[in-house]
Image (spheres, rainbow, N blue to C red):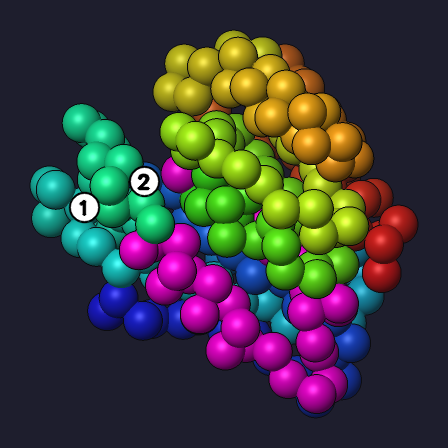
Amino acid sequence: MKDKIISFCSQESSHRLILIHGWGADAQDLIPFGQELLEEVALPFDLISLNAPQLHPDGTGRQWYSLFPPNWSEVPEAIKDLKSRLKSTVTNQIPFQKTFLLGFSQGGAMALSAGLGLPLAGLICCSGYPHPGWEPEDPNARILLTHGKFDEIVPLHAIDEISYILDKKKIDYQTHLFNGGHEISQEVIKTISLFIREYV
């Protein structure tokens, strides 16, 4: 289960979107969103969703590392594992430079930690947060941060913490705040599709 990948791939695809789910979800969770997003993008993309390595404590869903309570000591190994899996998706047809990485919530934190430093076409963090001690590498990647103003799961100040760290490193990024909670709204889908189309 831990290495499970759900993929929708085509010989005609020129780019790739990789999805990193949140705490308690699994690889299936973001597939409907990813398909809707790529319909909006309207370009030939492979779609891949990765399964987190650990079972969620209640036995349903997955987690990238223990979160309630958080076990931050598990994070380095989780990041190493995710980087390895991301590298395994690279092909001659679609290298990292044509790959977009999108993470939601805990998956957003993982995308930031594992994705920055890789030569991605773009990185999208939805309702994410920075890991303690996060020191982002400058990948010259394009970064989009989205967050709901009324998010009760990952409070809005998390995007300020990410922004502060990126600003200190002089890493460019875009932000999109919306009137919603812990979610990826239709408004956000349109924002992400524009971001992707800009950098394809």
* Rendered location of residue 94, percent (x, y): 71, 78
Q: Are marks 2 and 1 in contact (CB under 8 Å)?
A: yes
Disc 2 marks which amino acid?
Trp
The residue at 43%/21% (across/down) is 154
In the image, taking residue 188 as reference, residue 170 lies left or right, namely right
Q: Quadrant of residue 144?
A: top right
- Where does the C terminus fall, quadrant-wise? bottom right
Residue 105 in sight? no
Q: Please say if 195 is above or below 99.
A: above
* Rendered location of residue 123, percent (x, y): 66, 48
Magenta stretch? 77-106
Q: Is residue 130 magenta?
A: no
Q: Is residue 105 magenta?
A: yes
Residue 80 in sight? yes
Classify 10 Å Cα crowding around label 2: few (below 14), some (14-19), many (20 and above). Answer: many
Gap between marks 2 and 1 measured at Cα: 8 Å
* Rendered location of residue 37, percent (x, y): 67, 51
- Where does the N terminus fall, quadrant-wise? bottom left
Disc 1 marks which amino acid?
His
Earlier residue among tags 2 and 1: 2
Q: Please say if 156 is above or below 143.
A: above
The residue at 70%/87% (across/down) is 92
The residue under label 2 is 23
Classify 10 Å Cα crowding around label 1: few (below 14), some (14-19), many (20 and above). Answer: some
Q: Secondary structure at mark 2?
A: loop
Q: Which mark is residue 56?
A: 1
The residue at 68%/25% (across/down) is 168
Q: Secondary structure at mark 1?
A: loop
Q: Quadrant of residue 51?
A: bottom left
Q: Which mark is residue 100?
A: none
In the image, taking residue 5 as reference, residue 48 lies left or right, namely right
